[in-house]
Structures are given as structure tokens and as C-alpha cells.
Amino acid sequence: MAFKTSISDGLAELVLDKPPVNAFDSGEWHELAGLFTQLGDDPSVNVVLCRNEGRGFCAGVDVKELAADSSRIVEVNHGCYDTFAAIHDCAVPVVMAVSGFCLGGGIGMVGSADIILASDDATFGLPEIDRGAMGAATHLARMFPLQKVRRMFFTGEPIDALEAYRLGAVESVHPRDQLAAAARELAAVIAAKSPRAVRVAKEALNGIEPVDIKRSYRFEQGFTYEMYASSDSQEARDAFVEKREASFSDGGKTPGGKGNKD
């Protein structure tokens, strides 16, 4: 199983645990969306804490699934959309505890949440431009200023936890072996509040956001679908899976296998 859940004293803990890199296929994204909705609807839950086991928080979608069958992009897009929406719309606050890499769909998850904590070895990035895709800039924009978002999106370069903290994207940074405890301590403060007050507060905060992130992300997904229809996108996915440089129709190249977490 890619996910584990537990509930204690109003705090629900959802653990991402799919070795080696927490990259999820379309079915797993749909499952994850259901878990966030289920936990938020549970009257015994006042806060959800999501954290990871293993090397990184989330490497995004399973590129191998898409390299084998590009038509799966429709279901992958659907699963990602539902997951990010389920986190944002979760009836209770969602706290993310990120250790290691947080890439692609991982950004969609944490960028949909209410509070983010990070380990001192955490990194945040959107390598989509090198994977033949688009998406999650909407969620990156909930974390970082405009110019930083554009640099990260155009270059695919990640930033580290301390830079994310400096820019206000994460609440705090901790040694990796202390992150879970710090996140539970913060979540426990929320868990002790009035269940009714917590739910009303979450609804109110979502209601005053200046951007409808679901509509914005749906707009982005149209460009992901457009990109996936191109030969460059297929070449980028193939290069990533085969751990080689991609060679595009216009002569451009991108290091498809470089930095491959698999």
C-alpha cells in the first residue's frame, strides 16, 4: 500500500510510503484524493497531518506509466486535480511535513495545504518543463512570489528548505529526524480547538482567497494535455525513463535522465 493512515486525539496522520520515490500512478492519485476527503469528513478528526517515509515527500506522477501509454494523461490529470482539490477543500486544516524532494505533483499537494513544515534537507521544484508536461504553477504561486515562480517553472530548478523559509513558503525548518515530532506538536494545537470553530475557520479562509486554485489549475491542465500531444513531450518522457538526454525536433536538448530520483 502506498498510503497509511491513523487517527488519535483529533489528529489524523496520512503517510506517503511508496518506495523508492513516492511517485504515484493514476489509480493512486484517485485513492489519495479519497483519503483526504474521508479524513476531513470524519467527525473525530480536527486536523490532518501528511508526511512521508523514504527518500522524499513526493516525486509527482509515475512518468513510466505515461511513457508506456500517453493516453493515461487524462486519468493522471483527473487524479491530480481531485487530490489537490481534496486537500484544499478538506473540511479541516491540512499540515504538510516535507522531507527530501518535493516535485511536480508533490508541489500540487503542499501548495494546496494550509501549513507546510520542512526538514533541513527538503527541496521544492517543478521539473515539468523537462518532462514534457505543464502544471502546478497555480500551487507554486500559493507558496512563492511571482518572479520566483517563473524562474522555477522555466528552469525546472529546485530550491532548498532554507530559501523556501526565507520566502515564507514554509512555516519552519527542522532536522529530518525531528520533523515529524514538530509537525505533530503543531497539529496537536489545532486538534485541541473546537471542532466547529476549526471547520468554520477553514471554510472562511478558503472563501477569501484571491484566486480560485481549482479553476486556475484546470486552466493549466489544458496546456498539459496540449503538451502531451506533441512529439517533444513523448521524447522527454522516454529520455527520463531511459536516463538519457532528450533530443527534440528543433535540435534542442534537455537532460532527461539527470537528477532522476528513480
Image: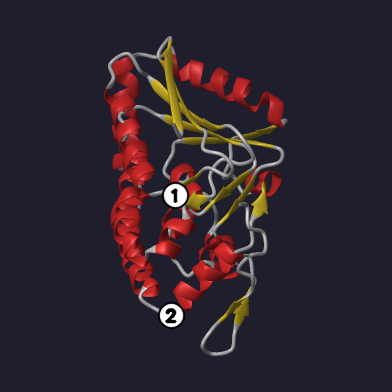
Q: Which residue is mark 1?
A: 108
Compare residues 199 and 85 and report the one nearer the observer. Answer: 85
Residue type at mark 2? Answer: Ser
Q: Residue 67 sits in which quadrant?
A: bottom left
Compare residues 51 and 197 and report the one nearer the observer. Answer: 51
Dot 1, crowdedness within 10 Å: few (<14), some or many (≥20)?
many
Residue 203 x/y as whole percent? 29, 33
Residue 260 x/y as whole percent? 63, 57
The image shows residue 254, relative to residue 178, as above or below, that is: below
**Mark sitting earlier along the chain (1/2):** 1
Residue 33 x/y as whole percent? 33, 39
Q: How is the image coloured?
A: secondary structure
Which residue is found at the position 52% from the left and 66% from the top? 131
Residue 201 x/y as whole percent? 33, 28
Residue 165 visible to an observer of this rendering:
yes
> In the visual, does 233 lie left or right of 32?
right
Q: Which residue is mark 2?
A: 231
Which residue is found at the position 32% from the left and 50% from the top? 81
Disc 2 element: helix
